[in-house]
Image (tube, rainbow, N blue to C red):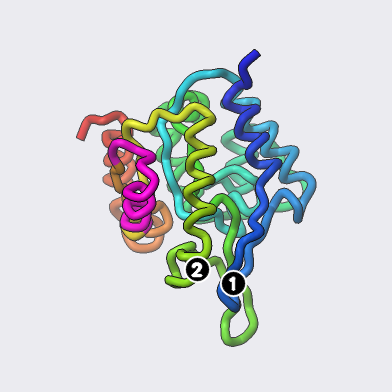
Amino acid sequence: MALTFAERVIRFNKSLHYTGKLPKGFKVLNPYLDNPETMEVMKQFYFKFYHDTQKRKFIIGINPSRHGAGVTGVPFTDTKRLDVVCGIKMQSAYTHEVSSVFMYEMIKDYGGPAEFYKQFYINSPFPLAIVRKTDDHKWLNANYYDDPKLFDMVKDFMIESLKKHISMGIDTSEAYVLGKKNADFLKILNKEAKLFGKLTALEHPRFIQQYKSKQKQIYIDKYILTLNNMI
């Protein structure tokens, strides 16, 4: 019997492990190893919204943040929205993540999580959190493209990860990429590996929340129109 979309995602997440090199000062965090409850709430989420064999469109982020998927195991979902919107409570952590705020406001306008997740799957080309050490020895969120050496070192892993995402049941005719810079790098990967027919870029939720919050509804409407292929 064929595995459901949920079972494929869970299998992928269970096997997630980065063994490649990293430039000095960078580190990869695996939320599933750091907190056993992350694996449990992640399973609950995917069984709740993805336990079918339906194909979905792919929304591609950058890499998980420490406060979103880096804790919950669910992209663009902090513990607050996992609980209040998705009905899945996490006991061992409480996080608030700005990108999650925008995504769930957009998901609400789209028709709610059940309707949205029935059609879309969100993940990242580098599906684990990346952090970099600052001069004063603090660890901050980092993006896979922040350093040319980092991108070169993780590129093959990202292509392999994207292929695994596609094998779960992704419609490859068009993928939606969050963040203009992310889209530039996804074009490089797509040219090399020929993964998607078309890449459509949208402003990243963090950018909208930080710099365009007064125009948030305009961006929510743009997301919905774009995702429905009405632009």
User: What kind of element bears circle 1?
Assistant: strand
Quadrant hosting residue 106: top left
Q: Foreground: 160 or 64?
A: 160
Report x, y in % for residue 50.
57, 25
**The residue under label 2 is which amino acid type?**
Leu
Q: Quadrant of the C terminus?
A: top left
Q: CA distance from mark 1 to mark 2?
A: 8 Å
Q: Which residue is mark 1?
A: 26
Q: Foreground: 179 or 173?
A: 173
User: What kind of element bears circle 2?
Assistant: helix
Q: Quadrant of the N terminus?
A: top right
**Circle 1/circle 2 CB separation < 8 Å:** yes
Q: Foreground: 84 or 59?
A: 59
N-terminal-most mark, 1 or 2: 1
Report x, y in % for residue 33.
75, 52
Q: Is residue 192 magenta?
A: yes
Identify the residue shown where x is 51% and y is 31%: 167
In-image side of 79 versus 230 (left or right): right
Report x, y in % for residue 213.
35, 56
Identify the residue shown where x is 56% and y is 57%: 65
- The residue sitting at the left extreme is 231
Q: Which residue is mark 2?
A: 150
Report x, y in % for residue 6.
61, 28
Label at residue 62: none
Is most of the magenta stretch helix, strand or loop? helix
In-image side of 174 versus 45 (left or right): left
Identify the residue shown where x is 73% and y is 42%: 39
Question: Is any part of residue 213 visible from this angle?
Answer: no
Q: Foreground: 122 or 150?
A: 150
Q: What's drawn in magenta, residue-wise? A: 182-198
* In the image, residue 55 above or below residue 223: above
